[in-house]
Image: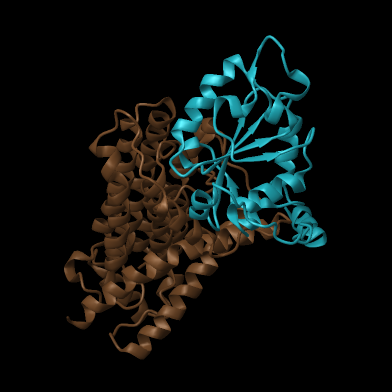
Chain colours: A brown, B cyan
Amino acid sequence: MSAPVLVSLAQVLLVLLGAPLLVGAMRRLRARMEGRTGGGVLQPWRDLLKLLRKAPLHPQGTGAAFRFAPLLGVACSGVAAAAIPLLSTRTGLGAGADLIAVVALLTLATAALALAGLDTATAFGGMGASREMTITALAEPAVLTAVCALAAKVGSTNLPAIVAATLSHGARPASPANLLAAVALAVVVLAETGRLPVDNPSTHLELTMVHEAMVLEYSGPDLAMVELGAAMRLTVLLGLWSALFAPWGITTTADPARLLLGLAAFAGKTLLLGCLIAAGEVFMAKVRLFRVPELLAGSFLLAVLAVSASFFLA
Amino acid sequence: MLSLLRKIVSVGRVAEPAPPRPEPAAADPAQRIRTLRGSAQVRCVDAGSCNGCEIEIGQAFGPVYDAERYGARIVASPRHADVLLVTGPVTRNMAEPLRRTYQAAAQPRVVVAVGDCAIDCGEFAGAYGVEGAVADVVPVDLAVPGCPPAPDQIVAALRRVTGR
């Protein structure tokens, strides 16, 4: 096997094993800030292993959409982890590691889960699916416009090419276009991973749920896949954001020593971003559903400004 | 926001030190409960209680008793749940929902009857709206007596399930 393929495999394994730990660390930090002790960093892994041991249970009347959505979610995040240059820009997918393709993959997972929510034919499943699709439909234009701003400078939407170009120009992360695109994408990452202020991941109130409402009917091994997929999605999106806007530590070779350094940098950056989100959530309430479009419209506006800045201020 | 940050720093951790681990549930449930080792998702079912037990359950998951550190977590759906915390005497209107909730939880599932009413109908025994105790409707694995039971007893019951 060639070195780039091994790099991609290592990235997939890293995201698969590390994503629940990231979620555990974020929950732990939040618990500590609320005066509690919390379940510990390993708790999400304990939950996942317990769920895998439970008996599978499919609600009456559900079909293929319900059955395959969790696996598709994990698979999409896995392929995205292979494509994004998390450790090294020499990933095994070559020209396939396209920024637009990665965004489309993550949207495919969202759409599959929304279909699964509809498939359960419960009130909350359909409500969650409709809300999730509303948010996705508003977030996608902002992502694609911000992508346009980043790609215009490099002349390619190939992710490794964008990251390599940023790495070779030390000052590029501080350019106006990049800063605007960074804020635009940060808002979208929060919306796409179902964090505050768009969605509350720890809510028990069905009427306010977005992501949770779609997965209310999942149990046992299926639920384990849904939770693993959601954790991997968070890790992948944080990794994508840091690769685009803070690519320090990502190597342009496949040298093992440099890769280890890249791994440490990736773990550090992702943990830092995750802890920032978790700490921010303590101070924040969920915004009303009808104000989410305003938030995402703001993100879209910043993305448009980023595009114009990349053309006029280059 | 700054005042909240100051509050977080000055209050620090309010969770009480963890009491010694209670011995794990023996008897028949052992086999089933062992599957839940380390992690138990909890769904509360109010089958007709006066809400006294709910207040104590809320305390058990609050900052002071902090049941989450032992691996128990409240979830929003019986499909996600391993443990059903059932409170109150089962009223006629709640008997069927309780049965359905039990059926909706994936195997292995554990039912914990919380409070005197859930164990033997307590104050409400023989009332016209009461179907019976929880054990008359669904099989009960663990019972937490008290009216209402103290949060640390609820936490102890949950720790017997998670084994932590």
Horizontal placement of A201 versus B22: left or right? left
- Given the current orientation, which residue lies at the most extreme front position? B27
Residue situated in front as seen by the camera: A39 or A294: A39
Which residue is pictured at 29% across the width and 32% down the height?
Answer: A62
Which residue is pictured at 74% across the width and 31% down the height?
Answer: B116
Residue situated in front as seen by the camera: B10 or B54: B54
Q: Position of residue A222 (x, y in %)?
A: 36, 47
Q: Position of residue A190 (x, y in %)?
A: 47, 51
Q: Position of residue A285 (x, y in %)?
A: 62, 43
Which residue is pictured at 79% across the width and 57% down the height?
Answer: B14
Q: How many discs appear?
A: 0
**Vertical placement of B113 versus A269: above or below?**
above
Q: Position of residue A195 (x, y in %)?
A: 51, 49
For residue A122, say whether it is visible.
yes
Residue situated in front as seen by the camera: A138 or A17: A17
**Vertical placement of A109 versus B17: above or below?**
above
- Given the current orientation, which residue lies at the most extreme top position? B128
Horizontal placement of A314 versus B43: left or right? left
**Vertical placement of A283 versus B91: above or below?**
below
- Quadrant position of residue A121: top left
- From the image, which quarter does the C terminus of chain A lie in? bottom left
For residue A170, say whether it is visible.
no
- From the image, which quarter does the N terminus of chain A lie in? bottom left
Which residue is pictured at 49% across the width and 72% down the height?
Answer: A269
- Quadrant position of residue A84: bottom left
- Quadrant position of residue B89: top right
